[in-house]
Image (cartoon, coloured by chain):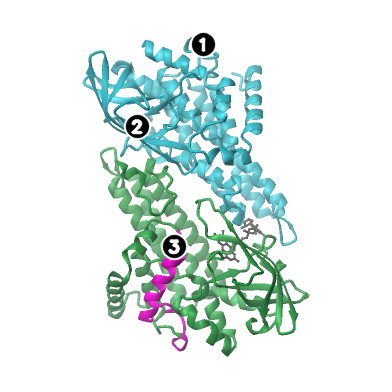
Chain colours: A cyan, B green
Amino acid sequence: MDLHLNEEQKLLKESAARFLRDQYAFDRRKLLIADDAPSGVWSKLVDLGWLGAWLPEEAGGLGGSAVEFAILMEEAGRHLYVGPYLSASIASALLRNADSRGARERLAASAEGERHLTVAHLEPGSRGMMDSPTVRGIAVGSSYRLTGRKRLVYSGCFADETIVSAVTPDGPSFFAVPMGGTGVATRHYRTVDNDWVSDVEFDLAEAELLVGAPGYASALDDAIYVALLGVGAEAIGLCEAVLTQTKDYLADRKQFGRSLIEFQALQHRISDLFVETETLRWSLLDALSQSSSARTLRARSIFGLKIQAGSIATMVAGQCLHLHGGMGMTDEMPVSHYYRRARMIEAQFGNTDYFTAAYTTLMD
Amino acid sequence: MNLDFSAEDIAFRDEIRAFLSENLPKDIARRFSRGYHPPKKDLQAWQAILHKRGWSVPHWPVEHGGTGWSPIQQYIFDDECLAADAPPVSPFGTRLVGPVIYTFGSDSQKKKYLPAILSGETLWCQGFSEPGSGSDLASLQTRAVRDGADYVVNGRKIWTTDAHFADMMFCLARTSQGRKQQEGISFLLLDMKDPGVTVRPIRTLDAGHTVNEVFIDNVKVSADDLVGQEGKGWSYAKFLLDNERTVNAFVHHSKRAYRRTKKIAQKAQFNGQPLFDVSGFRNRAARLEIELRALEWGVLRMLHSDVPDPTAAASALKLKGCALLQNILDLALDALGLDAIPFYPDPEQEAVSNFF
Ligand SMILES: Cc1cc2nc3c(=O)[nH]c(=O)nc-3n(C[C@H](O)[C@H](O)[C@H](O)COP(=O)(O)OP(=O)(O)OC[C@H]3O[C@@H](n4cnc5c(N)ncnc54)[C@H](O)[C@@H]3O)c2cc1C
């Protein structure tokens, strides 16, 4: 066992940090999130190799692992990145072990930035990623037609294609559907944390089968692992950054003739938040250690990370918001954005209640 | 000790309910039910309706326009209004400065200001906090210098709720340098239409606009608009904040939020059953329900009996009340599950999830 980052991983972390510091500084980010669709930074992330950084070479990647993905997401969290990276990575995770030609082609095209992919899996009424799809797929010649509704399709306004879960007479499967195709109606809107999402309604939309029923469960498991690892690592970057900024704020802010950080009551609160953030990093190591373990072992560790991330990030960012006094309530201060992102990490893909219930079914 | 509501209290509650169902405009209630800050027109329209019935300031003494209701009746009234989604009357005139004026103000101030506070024609804002003076309010720097029959006021206020549509501000300004910071502060009534007043909006994390920064630049305030004695403003400010002992428990808000959370959880399906029947969720709801019951008695106790240290007890109500409201709203978000994610910037917009 060696818990150090290797040289390449250190370089990756530094380059990601430098890039986000330069290109995604809070003031610049303000302009970027005001746009109707994610833009700008995306092509640069692709050029930097973020999409392939954690994929094996045979999947069009650079030969990295879950660790590389966690490194990138942690930096993303630190800088409050919102945009297509996570959803495109979940699409890659879905396809990476599929043996269809369509899946392999798309993986490579995605890593190259030639085709932007997202995932349409959640539906109205679903509470998390393990809920079964109800969108129906019927075979028509060599292709399929899909009918039904999906929601919370991240970057739906921006993607070329979406990977859709649907039920066929053979069982649930994953399909590719072009976003602008016939029989695809979209409604784009924003999330509480300024991300871009869409609801999509398929009406006999033409679809290509990528992962058939036999591979469905394990492809979904891979997608869940990457989704939860992503927000788990992101939550760590988020907590560390918001805590540092809050300490700085309290050092600058003077009331009663001295810096607020000099009040011991506030030092105690900061220490408690540091302790919580530390425990989140322990859970990340646990989840990374199980990245190629058997199904139940991996699921337990990754559900654990998601539960810790949602509750700890919400608590830490919420406390930091309070510690900013009135300033914390303003859109102008990063802390209010960290809080909203943290609260959405809690809700995304299924909340703490959802994954706790799932965890209890996996206990020995 | 008698812990029951009397038959008169129940009859009173029914009277309020009947009044609300006949008089509360549906569109005002609908807008408020969606959780946005009520616009000025809704605040004024609703207060005018209450005023017509004589109910805009139940807590005031009868001679100034109050109803003479018992504390418990006032409590029932507030509870029913909020339960019906009536936007609470703007507190700055009715709850904060009004009582200061009728307690410490001159006869001409009472005549000039109280009727329009009662009717809601004049809306007020509270100019206490400053950029450098938040928790440490007594360090405030805004200055008022006497010049003949006027004070000339200069300074900067921040977090001033509703300043962008208020007609008047009650403000704390330093008129002299005392030995202690709390000395030498005066309580002034300032006209927001004065050309020396500039209001800068502060956008908040909900993308809403309620708070502002207010720049006060050589604003003339007539000495007639000094409340009470010069230099004694701090004691009036404390009186004002002390009047708010139970309001900051937000118990009616919490009861309303809890009822709505329960409805959401009864409707939401989790693994084939209503979320509200799922034991983990139900346990969390039970804990909050128990705290809510306790808080309600905390408020009733404060209203009804002689609490040994009311200021400390009020802090307990504020701390517990705010934490409980936050926890209930967190439970509501958890009940919404993935529906907590979409953002609805526009109060008139239908929920995105109704798309399907
Ligand atoms: C939505 C909103 C509406 C408001 N409306 C009005 C209004 O209409 N009129 C008005 O005058 N004001 C208004 N306020 C201002 C409010 O009263 C102040 O925010 C409050 O007094 C706190 O001051 P501050 O924001 O400067 O925080 P700070 O005083 O800077 O405090 C920052 C943090 O440090 C903590 N802290 C401070 N001192 C200590 C200490 N000695 N020991 C331990 N912890 C400490 C605080 O609890 C807080 O968490 C409003 C505020 C908000 C958020």
Residue A72 picture location, percent across and down = 57, 27
Q: Residue at point 62% right, 43% down?
A: A243
Q: Which secondary structure type mostly characterizes the magenta part of the structure?
A: helix
Q: Residue furthest left?
A: A169
Q: Which residues are magenta?
A: B37-64
Residue B306 picture location, percent across and down = 49, 78
How many C-alpha atoms fall within 10 Å of the one at disc 2: few (<14), some, or many (≥20)?
A: few
Is there CB contact under 8 Å for labels 3 and 1? no
Above-or-below relation of B123 to A53: below
The one of B296 and A241 positioned closer to us in this rendering: A241
Disc 1: which chain?
A
User: Would residue B44 be counted in the magenta stretch?
Assistant: yes
Q: Label 3: which residue?
A: B38
Disc 3: which chain?
B
Q: Secondary structure at mark 1?
A: helix
Q: Label 1: which residue?
A: A57
Relative placement, left or right, of B300 versus B172 is: left
Q: Is mark 1 within 8 Å of ligand 1?
A: no
Q: Secondary structure at mark 2?
A: loop
Residue type at numbered disc 1: Glu
Q: Secondary structure at mark 3?
A: loop
User: Would residue B137 be counted in the magenta stretch?
Assistant: no
Residue A364 badge: none
Relative placement, left or right, of B305 versus A181 is: right
Q: If the image is split into quadrants, where does the C terminus of chain B sit?
A: top left
The one of B21 and A338 positioned closer to us in this rendering: B21
Q: Residue at point 43% right, 57% down?
A: B36
Q: Label 2: which residue?
A: A361
